[in-house]
Amino acid sequence: MQFLSDNADLLWSAFLTTLSLAVVSGVCALVLGTVLAGMRVSPIAPLRGLATFYVEVFRNTPLTVVFFFLAFGIVQIDLQFPSRFITAVAALSLYTAAFVCEALRSGINAVPSGQAEAARALGLTFGQSLRQIVLPQAFRTVVPPLGNVWIALAKNTSIAAGFAVTDLTAALQRLANANADQLLAVFAAVVAGYLVITLPSAWLIRVVENRVAIVR
Amino acid sequence: MTSQLAGGPLVQLTGVNKWFGELHVLQDIDLSIDRGEVVVVIGPSGSGKSTLCRTINRLETIQQGEIRIDGEKLPEEGKALARLRSDVGMVFQSFNLFAHKTILENVTLAPTKVRRQSKAQAEQRARELLDRVGVGHQADKYPAQLSGGQQQRVAIARALAMDPKVILFDEPTSALDPEMINEVLDVMTTLAREGMTMVVVTHEMGFARRAANRVVFMDGGRIVEAAEPETFFSNPRSERARDFLSKILNH
């Protein structure tokens, strides 16, 4: 305990880094994933093709490889992110967006086709009918799978530790390496840090799911 | 009832053909509907009557022929098609009210998003229309909380809120419990009397007799016969129509 309180500053800032990696990437992935899902059901074939290509590339590439490419690969084409944190956010967002897109697309497919037909028959454009009718109903049915994506993302942030971002996992490595006798204490603190993020999420997902449920 | 002939037919289908794969579901359809006219389309299931109804606002595409609404050729897609659809109301067999929106929001959505009316203006009109179809007191409920007959009357109010030139009814009473059919047909009969142009696909022969200017009988993707209701029901010309009527009217 004494050891943990001596290193409280490091652990606290590591926790905040993990939390902000997850939240910022989660928001970016949600926005990008929604746009991708809209493209995948769009009547314009090139948009559909582009979104499908994106999803297949990022869903089937290991996250570590995505990190590696963004951290080192893009230097080859004279690009660089302003900070390691932003590199990590970009990798997590690009990767997770593919999963958000697919979860959302399954929700879009679950919306009865009559809903979109009624919207189009009233004169709403494709975009309007997607925004007003289809997506709001799709989101409601995919709260549980989106919850899974969010929890996976929260844990995937640990890859950033390998790319010089001082998150919880990096703190674990650093403290445990220097103080082998305190391994269990550090381990418990770090696991608790992840659980503080993921456990309330699971509860929140259930609450949101019940709240937004639509009766048919 | 006479049709007003201002500016030619409101809906005109010329040489319309449609295939679902091998199946030739609409064959050489020519049909012209005047302003204020109520056309009831009847026929056995699979005769293409619903498909015909759905081609008029291009929910179904056609492979050959031409459809004009108020003289304007149906655009193929995009904003022009959306604009034209906003003038063509549609009432579906399964109501298709927006499940996540209240009754009032269902009716105000298109006027505010498509016609750019103010929220207050759209709500006032929506409440008038909901009162008119007898569901004004349900405005704040969600569709699933209403009976089928009430939902279908809301769907009619939703179509009316756009001040359409014509309303298409695709079997509007086929999904309803028997005791709810009349409350919907009453609203439709009133609309017909008030001069709304209507295309109604239905099995309700009573409504056809009461409200139609013309009955169109379809079979096998073709229009077999078209006549005034009295003529059609008392003296059908085609063998196929006689056979169809004998099966449904004897019960």
Image: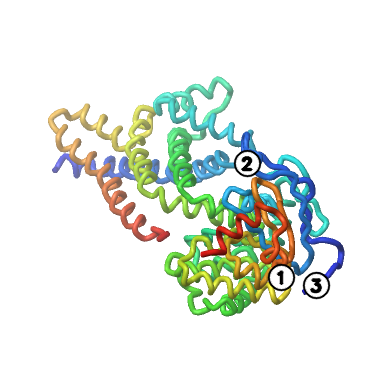
| Residue at (72% x, 62% y) in the render | B87
The image position of residue A13, as x and y in percent, is: 32, 43
Which mark identifies residue B2?
A: 3
| Residue at (36% x, 56% y) in the render | A208
Are circles 2 and 1 on residues that touch, CB within 8 Å?
A: no
Are circles 2 and 3 on residues that touch, CB within 8 Å?
A: no
Q: Where is A177 relative to A136, above or below?
A: above
Q: What residue type is labelled 1?
A: Met
Q: Residues within 10 Å of mark 3 (few under 14, many from 20)?
A: few
Q: Where is A57 relative to A131, above or below?
A: above
Q: Nearer the viewer, mark 2 or mark 3?
A: 3
Give A8 or A152, whichever is nearer the viewer.
A152
Which mark identifies residue A4?
A: none
* Image quadrant assignment for residue A118: bottom right
Q: Mark 1 lies on which chain?
A: B
Give B157 or B142, whichever is nearer the viewer.
B157
Residue that badge 1 annotates: B196
Q: Which chain carries label 2?
A: A
